[in-house]
Image (cartoon, rainbow, N blue to C red):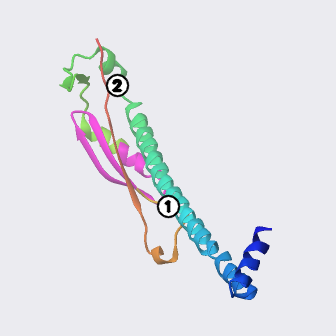
Amino acid sequence: MAVISAITKDVIAGGSAAQHVMQRKKDAGSTLPLLLGIFLLLLSIFMISVNIFALRAAKMNLEILGEDVLSNVYQDIDYQEYFFGNSLAVTTNRRSWLPFACEPLVLKVSEAVRNLSRSTRMERVECKSGRLELLLSNEVQLPFKPGFLSNFRPIVFATVSGGVQRVR
């Protein structure tokens, strides 16, 4: 009823009903580009979030892999030396670390590196008084990769360190 009365008032005021209907049709389609823009913005935020999550998951997997390598290296320690030995522990930051010879530990790490996947690399191995520090890297495939990033290959790094503590 309000539309009819508005058209009637417009006709009485000297305008035509056709002009009024044409004016309403021009305003009717203006929300479509806005909605399309909002949809594209939300889609791009979703894609970026998924890519960031994939990078974080790859870093967590590298940390787990590094901890597994360290765990396997320290599984073969000398039982007698560890529990009953008289070697003095190296004390740093309120922790007492049992010293080991670094050469056998680094050799065990290099053997464990052979079992890694092709995209995972051991960048650095440091040994100080029997404490190992490993730096691992992995090339990650992103779930959403736009065409302009076709040559972009993100590399994730993870540092893992560990040693053996003795408590008396």
As displayed, is residue 44 above or below residue 156? below
Q: Residue at x 27, y 34 (%)?
A: 131
Residue at (47% x, 56% y) in the render: 52
Q: Which of marks 2 and 1 is nearer the N terminus?
A: 1
Q: In which quarter of the image is residue 85?
A: top left
Q: Mark 1 points at which residue?
A: 48
Q: Which amino acid does label 2 sit on?
A: Asp
Residue 108 on the magenta segment: no
Horizontal and vertical percent position of residue 5:
76, 73
Q: How crowded is mark 1: few (under 14 residues within 10 Å), some or many (20 or more)?
A: some
Measured as percent of width and height from the top left, residue 150 is found at 48, 75
Residue 2, numbered circle = none
In the image, residue 120 lies in the stretch drawn in magenta: yes
Q: Distance between the residues labelled 2 and 1?
A: 49 Å
Q: Does 101 sit above or below residue 152?
A: above
The one nearer the camera, 103 or 124, is 124
In the image, 57 versus 65, the foreground residue is: 57
The magenta stretch spans which residues?
A: 109-137
Q: Image check: 28 left or right of 62? A: right
Residue in the picture at 26% in, 25% down = 98
68 left or right of 104? Answer: right
